[in-house]
Image (cartoon, rainbow, N blue to C red):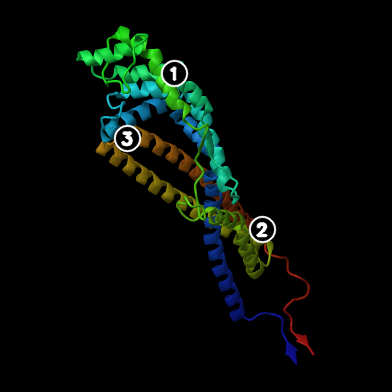
Amino acid sequence: MEVTSKPSSDQSCVIQGFAVLVGIIFVIVTTMVLVAIPTEAQLFNPNVYKHALQSQDLYDQLPSLLGELMAASKTDNDAPDNAARYLSQEDFTFIIAKLFPPEWIQAQVESLIDQTFGFYNTTSSEAKIEMPLTELKARLGGEGGDQIMRQIVSSWPLCTTEAEQQAWLSLVNPGENPPDEMPECRPPNDVLDAATPQLGQMFDEMVADMPDTADLTPKYLPDPEATGKDPRPTLMAIRWMIKLSPLIAIGLLAAVTVLAVRSRKSFLGWWGALFLCVGIGTFLLAAVSGLMVEGMIEAIVAEVISQSAAGTELVVALLEVIRSILRGAGIRISILAGLSGVLGLTMAVAAFFVGGSKPKAEDPYATVQY
């Protein structure tokens, strides 16, 4: 009886074909892995957002951007009881700059960024996103409040009636009782100067009712004020899947190796071809995605500018921050694509200079007689 250990040509073709199929799956999966991992690392890194906001000089621009937004939108709140309805864009910018210095804004925004990522990195019900208001309240009180009230009153139309002028005089003259509601008109400068401390005192009374901390924590079920289901468990599961996805690629690469590699030459050839395809595919995917994102942002910017809506400059500035963050992800992906392509090309070239396995003295597929 004869038993042969040499596989038939049909079996070899099936094995090689299956290796090619697994190799194609490896290229697709690894390309997705090389896109997903740096994207996850970029989007879930709080330092990325801090750097993007700072690099766009947004903190220094914020008073003027918010001033433009508030001036453009004040027409939507032109009710008679809105004391700020006469303020111009310059007035709003002055008040915001007085209340929110750039260094204070940066400290608060970076603290909120850290707290937000901390909140979404856990499923604990004890996690909070809070903004302290004690420093802001202190700034609103005293001289800061006096200047803000003076700026608001200075924007009002001049007092034209005797009753209006008398109401303002009663505010500064000792022994007189001012009316419960002051007329919305601007008194003479000397009367306004004398009334500024009293205006600041009224402002201080309003500020005293402000809480010391603003709770910005999202409310999820079963909270009575819930806005929806808590997405954190799902988000964390997706992030873990992305982090563990390289194991799938490693398993597929091992399968290709077992099925197709029989020598150093075939090892270099197969691995070189696979990594070269991964590098090219990843680079093309990153390039196409980058062009699509750039096109979308440009289209949104053009649409916002064409509408001349309130807060146009602020929206454009925020879009530039988003563009900066996504470009960072694209750079990371391109670097990984380049490394994979260079590795694959090097191995593929090396395969041409490496000989196959040396022939053995005894044919391993020789027929064995029984």
Of mark 1 and mark 2, the one earlier in the sequence is: 1
The alpha-carbon separation of the residues under discs 1 and 3 comes to 29 Å
Per the image, label 3 sits on a secondary structure element best described as helix
Instruction: Report the residue marked by disc 2.
Output: 354
Q: List x then y, in percent, for residue 301.
A: 33, 39
Instruction: Report the residue marked by disc 1.
Output: 144
Per the image, label 1 sits on a secondary structure element best described as helix
What residue is drawn where x is 30% and y is 35%?
Answer: 310
Q: List x then y, in percent, for residue 169.
A: 30, 11
Is residue 147 in sight in this rendering? no
Per the image, label 2 sits on a secondary structure element best described as loop
Q: How many marks?
A: 3
Instruction: Report the residue marked by disc 3.
Output: 312
The alpha-carbon separation of the residues under discs 1 and 2 comes to 78 Å
Q: In the image, is 104 to the left or to the right of 192? A: right
Type of residue at label 3? Thr
Type of residue at label 2? Val
- In the rendered image, the vertical position of residue 281 relative to residue 94, given as above or below: below
Q: Quadrant of residue 183?
A: top left
- Compare residues 81 and 218 and report the one nearer the observer: 81
- Compare residues 334 and 322 and report the one nearer the observer: 322
Q: Quadrant of residue 175?
A: top left
- In the rendered image, the vertical position of residue 315 relative to residue 68, given as above or below: below
Label 2 or label 3, whichever lies nearer to me, is 3
Q: Quadrant of residue 271?
A: bottom right
Q: List x then y, in percent, for residue 337.
A: 53, 49
Label 1 or label 2, whichever lies nearer to me, is 1
